[in-house]
Amino acid sequence: MTQPFLHHGGRLSEAARTFGGADWLDLSTGLNPSPWPTGKAPACDWTALPDPEALTALEHEAARHFGADPARVCAVPGSETALRLLALLLDLPGRALTPAYRTHAEAFTPSRPIAFAQAPQRAEVVVLANPNNPDGLLRAPAAIRSWHEAIARTGGWLIVDEAFADCQPEISVATDVQPGARLIVLRSFGKFFGLAALRLGFVIAPPSLAARLRSVLGSWPLHAAALTIGRAAYADHEWTARTRADLPRRAAALDGVLQSHGFSPQGACPLFRYLTGCNAQALFTRLAQAQILTRPFATRPDTLRLGVPADVRALVRLDRALADG
């Protein structure tokens, strides 16, 4: 029953075909449910080719947001695409943590699991997310730096996927990406700003690798709307500060509802919570029958991830669906 929903979040059309109903609450993605208001962005010129100067301006604004050198920040059409391109450019076998974002292993052939801080014995590309996806585990930057040093000594690379780090900027290791380092940081626009449809992400890499990536991407890696909206959103410091304060409160409200039904939610990222030790198949189906979509996992049938609801109305709806079981 859950097979179509085991790859990534989303797929509301598939959910409606499978379970019926039209008024769906999507808690499957871990996106900010209150996105940056695109009406605040300047008008986009759809008649012209994307302007290279607009791309440079976006990368500079994003670099300021990340605390990184703009020369090392390369805009890409989503971090999913970036991972697959990096696998080709680095041309090494991969290692990924478990549990992890599915593409961390899929992008590299071959890829094997690895435990955090385990020292590889040969040159490999190790990929981890911080905060981790799907369990929301948060690792200290000092521990990541130490692991990077051990990996670099083998001639390998460490890729740190910081797709959810905008909520807690102090955990980022973006400033550690220096010339000669074998460290790459990925950032995602769509999670924190809630605009996944733009397919906008960034690779923060040593200058030589960033230049190779720009060469592969070509002259127009992003469409004009991504350039315009992305730059305006990153420049909106007031919205960013307010959202960083609001999301933990929403996550705490979700924790309260889940705990009231006997669950022990896990995760340090305020965009989603992770449930373990549950009958995920039954819980997923029960919520789907109430038109609430969550995220199950093929290799962990006792776990389920839920995004943070947007408002009290959505939270009450989830509370009632859980009570109906």
Image (cartoon, helix red, strand yellow):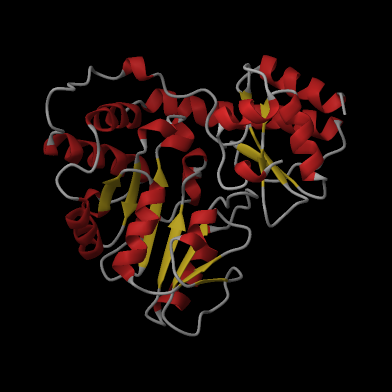
x then y, percent, for residue 276: 77, 49
Report the side of 268 relative to 32 (left or right). Answer: right
Residue extending farthest to the front is 17
Residue 268 seen in render: no
Residue at 22%, 51% (x, y): give it: 217
Above or below — where is 280 with respect to 314?
Answer: below
Residue at 43%, 76% (x, y): give it: 124
Above or below — where is 31 with respect to 301?
Answer: above
Q: Quadrant of residue 47?
A: top left
Q: Quadrant of residue 112?
A: bottom right
Report the side of 282 relative to 308 (left or right). Answer: right
- On the rendered image, what quadrant is the C terminus found in? top right
Above or below — where is 141 with respect to 15?
Answer: below
x then y, percent, for residue 36: 42, 23
Residue 87 seen in render: yes
Residue at 43%, 56% (x, y): give it: 173
Which of 206 and 238 lies nearest the eye of the viewer? 206
